[in-house]
Amino acid sequence: MGLEGVASGVMIKEVLLKLDVETLCSLACVSRSLRFSVSQALSLFSALNLSTFSPDAQTVAHILGRTRTRTNGGSLLKSLTINCLRLDDSCVPLFLSPHLHDLNLLSCSLLSYHLLPSIGETCPNLR
């Protein structure tokens, strides 16, 4: 019995939601069914911690694009911690959302201070 025989809901609830993002990204490369299940799991996360690695813009777009696949483009993501070491100002809109309550930006050497007003405007619910 292959992975296709395992119900997607069971796979997501019992396995995928218990894994870290790096492992999920690796699993998504294995097969189409796992990629679909990982995409579904990412859309259910309310908190995401991307501090253990420094993603590039493409990786951020793939990961966070999955969190916005909810109906009406809404997101359940309320808390985000991200290592910005490889990100510049153009990447910031990828992770800003009015739904965010907590935003932790780490290693922001390539980001300018000009972004602060746009972060405040786009994320009015930040604490």
Image: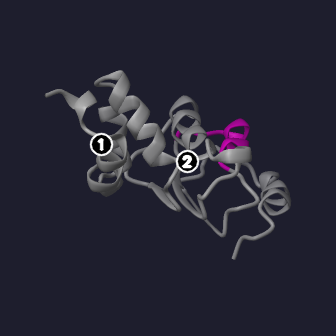
* Spot occupied by residue 93 in the image (x, y as percentages of width and height): 73, 44
Q: Which residue is mark 1?
A: 23
Q: Nearer the viewer, residue 109 or 118?
A: 118
Q: Which residue is mark 2?
A: 84
Q: Earlier in the sequence, mark 2 or mark 1?
A: 1
* Spot occupied by residue 5 in the image (x, y as percentages of width and height): 23, 32
Position of 22 with respect to 117 (left or right) is left
**Residue type marked 2:** Cys
Assign the C terminus to one quadrant of the image. bottom right
Badge 1: few (under 14), some or many (20 or more) residues near its Cα, within 10 Å?
few
Position of 98 with respect to 33 (left or right) is right
Position of 90 relative to 99 (above/below):
above
Please give the name of the residue rendered at 72% of the width and 36% of the height, measured from the top-left corner: 90
Position of 80 with respect to 73 (left or right) is left
* Magenta stretch encompasses residue 107: no
Indicate the secondary structure of the residue bearing disc 1.
Answer: helix
Indicate the secondary structure of the residue bearing disc 2.
Answer: loop
Q: Nearer the viewer, residue 74 or 53?
A: 74
**Residue type marked 1:** Thr
Q: Residue furthest bottom?
A: 127
Residue range highlighted in magenta: 86-95
Query: What predominant SS class does the magenta segment belong to?
Result: helix
Please give the name of the residue rendered at 47% of the width and 42% of the height, measured from the top-left corner: 40
Position of 98 relative to 125 (above/below):
above
Q: Residue furthest left?
A: 1
Please give the name of the residue rendered at 64% of the width and 53% of the height, measured from the top-left corner: 75
Assign the N terminus to one quadrant of the image. top left
